[in-house]
């Protein structure tokens, strides 16, 4: 892993035990230690508030920003967003956050099992033909879309089946 934003931090913050003098070491959290039937890593999953950690500048109602983030310096907004994401993933790796890896594995299983394929196919079928295809191919703009919507009869409301979809996803989590 390339260390770009946190060069002074080891690849992954290590467990060194309660007597460690290293300010960037876990003293009690040993991801491999079993507590009951699970490891600490299984019991205790890290979380990071992305917006506050990577987008915030330390300002509050009483004053100006109190810190600058290296990843927020690019002039181009897309470059700033990419750098922020790179900083976040570097940070997550150094903390040893496995939640993203777990999420990707779950997403791949859902795709491989094709449990949502028929729903997605049905839900977005109108994007392949007619006006939907024109929108998706960029052949029309907002003014045309506005006119088209106003010319349509009232839509027939149809359930999005959210609870069913949540239950499918939760079965994988």
Image (cartoon, rainbow, N blue to C red):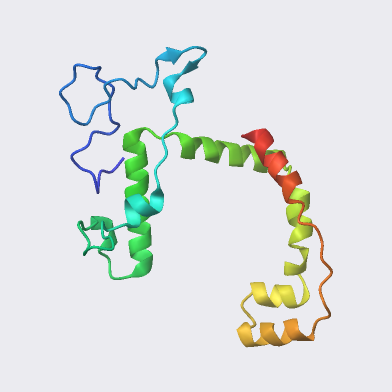
- In the rendered image, the quadrant that contains the N terminus is top left
Q: Position of residue 123 (x, y in %)?
A: 76, 59
Q: Residue furthest left?
A: 21
Q: How many marks?
A: 0
Residue under the image location 20 percent in, 56 percent down: 67
Q: Residue at the location (65% across, 72% down)?
A: 136
Residue at point 38%, 22% (across, down) = 31
Whole-percent x, y for residue 134 in the image? 69, 77
Q: Is residue 159 visible?
A: yes
The picture places residue 2, in percent across and down from the top left corner, at 28, 43
In the image, residue 142 sits, relative to residue 32, either above or below, namely below
In the image, taking residue 49 as reference, residue 129 lies left or right, namely: right
Q: Nearer the viewer, residue 2 or 80?
A: 80
Quarter placement of the C terminus: top right
Rendered image quadrant of residue 138: bottom right
- Residue 20 to residue 108: above or below: above
Decide if residue 155 is on the left or right side of residue 85.
Answer: right
Residue nearest the viewer, comparing 39 with 74: 39
Q: Residue 69's spot in the image, x, y percent?
A: 24, 56
As displayed, is residue 40 above or below residue 120? Answer: above
- Whether residue 116 can be seen here: no
Quadrant in the rendering for residue 71: bottom left
- Is residue 96 placed above or below 117 in the rendered structure? above
Q: Residue at x 20, y 57 (%)?
A: 66
* Residue furthest out toward the front: 62
């Amino acid at each position: 892993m390339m260390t770009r934003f946190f060069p002074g931090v080891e690849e992954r913050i290590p467990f060194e035990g309660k007597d460690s003098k290293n300010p960037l070491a876990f003293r009690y959290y040993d991801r491999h230690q079993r507590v009951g039937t699970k490891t600490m890593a299984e019991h205790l999953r890290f979380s990071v508030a992305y917006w506050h950690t990577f987008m915030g500048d330390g300002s509050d109602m009483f004053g100006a920003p109190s810190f600058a983030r290296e990843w927020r310096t690019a002039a181009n907004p897309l470059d700033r967003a990419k750098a922020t994401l790179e900083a976040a993933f570097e940070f997550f790796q150094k903390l040893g956050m496995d939640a993203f890896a777990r999420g990707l594995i779950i997403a791949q299983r859902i795709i491989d099992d094709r449990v949502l394929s028929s729903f997605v196919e049905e839900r977005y079928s109108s994007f392949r033909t007619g006006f939907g295809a024109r929108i998706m191919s960029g052949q029309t703009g907002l003014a045309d879309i506005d006119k088209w919507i106003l010319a349509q009869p009232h839509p027939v409301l149809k359930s999005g089946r959210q609870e069913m979809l949540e239950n499918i996803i939760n079965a994988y989590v």
